[in-house]
Image: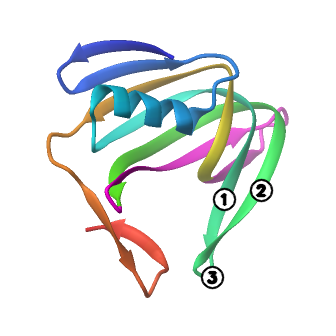
Amino acid sequence: MIIHKIKKDLFVLSIEPKEELISELLSFCKKQKINSGFFIGFGAVRSGIIGRYTNKNYKWKKFSGEFEIGSLVGNLTLKDNELFIHSHVVLGDKNFKALVGHIKELIIYPTCEIIFWSFDKKIKRKYNKETNLFLIN
């Protein structure tokens, strides 16, 4: 990953070929000592796992091939005092059809460009029994 610090709380990140998005973002946040933030991005991927929340659980789908990232948006919070990324993506295939979902894993190729804003305040998640999710508290 290539990191450009624009100012104290603003970064431009370039995820390099074959890097996994979520693990790279978590590594970046640990190194920068960031506990909470928000990011947006675009680029392309060659494979991954995305999910859809239904019936209080996620249904996961693996995919591979050439996909454009039409939209990438997410946040960084603390869940049980550990860094947690919640992110969604819209992917376009070679036939211009979209896959949409919650990101579990994305292998970037050839690049993914992200703008990341870090927050001074720690944003935490708390388990919500009704939804079976950890929601921002």
Q: Is residue 75 left or right of residue 73?
A: left
Mark 3 is on which residue type? Asn
**Residue 119, label in figure:** none
The first of marks 2 and 1 along the sequence is 1
In the foreground, 124 or 102? 124
**Residue 51, label in figure:** 1
The main secondary structure of the magenta stretch is strand
Mark 2 is on which residue type? Lys
Q: Secondary structure at mark 2?
A: strand
**Residue 55, label in figure:** 3
**Other residues around mark 3 within 10 Å, as few (<14) / some (14–19) / many (≥20):** few
Q: Position of residue 64 (x, y in %)?
A: 83, 38
The first of marks 3 and 2 along the sequence is 3
User: Which residue of the protein is positioned furthest toward the bottom in this rendering?
Assistant: 130
Q: Quadrant of residue 21?
A: top right
Instruction: Locate the C terminus by quadrant.
Output: bottom left
For the residues labelled 3 and 1, the Cα–Cα distance comes to 13 Å
Q: Position of residue 1 (x, y in %)?
A: 51, 17
For the residues labelled 3 and 2, the Cα–Cα distance comes to 16 Å
**Residue 61, label in figure:** 2
Q: Quadrant of residue 80?
A: bottom left
